[in-house]
Amino acid sequence: MTAAFTIAIDGPAAAGKGTISKAVAAHFGFKHLDTGLLYRAVGAKTLLGMDPIKAAQALKAEDLHASDLRSPEVAQAASRVAVLAEVRAALVDFQRSFARRQGGAVLDGRDIGTVICPDAEAKLFITADADVRARRRYEELAGKGGGLRYEQVLAEVRERDARDRDRAAAPLVPAKDAALIDTSQMSIEDAILAAISVIEERRS
Ligand code: CDP
């Protein structure tokens, strides 16, 4: 088993972090944690009336498998609970111990390279124009039904990005030493290859 090696992948909503992170983890044989799911699971509990800080402090592994965590309502709830420093603090230890597991880890989110794993061996910031990201998310959600409009998805992506960027606690910002990949004009296959090549460089 190889030593700990952390890959931090951050970026705005629907930039392709999830797909790239899964592919990178498969390529290197590392485990992957989608940290957005932690905030989505807490957000989902607040939609049921729970206090966000209590929900974060009591979060269990099985909560990450709740149905509907990918819905737009839960995404908005996630970004609302994510502004709370106490919610973020409750989720730090779990993320850090995952990051330092033997055999390597890929974590994707908003603050992995800046706050959770500032010493990560490789950092990527994946971005794309808001309209490209909204189009991709619209197509993903439309595939599941639900009668969404593209304009609505774009407005929600913009609203969530603004909330994530402007918050005081762990705002969405690239780490100084992160490699930036703009996927606006790239196929997902090319974006994955670009990510792998940046990480290969940091490994050598
Ligand atoms: O999949 P998508 O990029 O749309 O969102 P996500 O990664 O599942 O994250 C949902 C929300 O959780 C974000 O809009 C952030 O507000 C919050 N989040 C965060 O604050 N920090 C993280 N490390 C991950 C997610």
Image (cartoon, grey):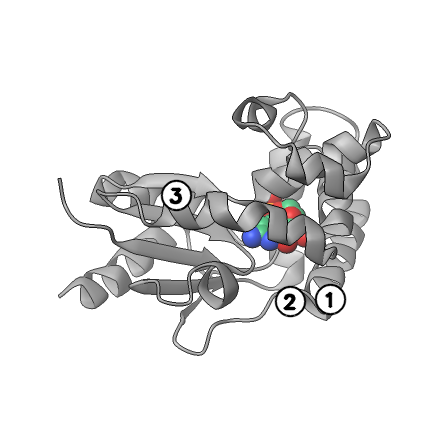
Rendered image: mark on residue 99: none
Report helix, strand or loop for mark 3: helix
Query: Is residue 152 shown left or right of residue 19?
Result: right
Report whether 35 appears left or right of 86: left
Q: Residues within 10 Å of mark 3 (few under 14, many from 20)?
A: some
Q: Are marks 2 and 1 in contact (CB under 8 Å)?
A: yes
How far apart in space, not on screen, are marks 2 and 1 (Cα)?
Answer: 5 Å
Tell me where residue 29 sits by quadrant.
Answer: top left
Asked if disc 2 is less than 8 Å from ligand 1, the answer is no
Provide residue 43's location: percent of width, then percent of height: 73, 38
Q: Amino acid at mark 2?
A: Pro
Check disc 1 and report its element: helix, strand or loop: loop
Q: Which residue is mark 3?
A: 98
Q: Which residue is mark 2?
A: 171
Q: Earlier along the polypeptide chain: callout 1 or callout 3?
A: 3
Q: Position of residue 170 (x, y in %)?
A: 62, 65
Quarter of the figure with the C terminus:
bottom left
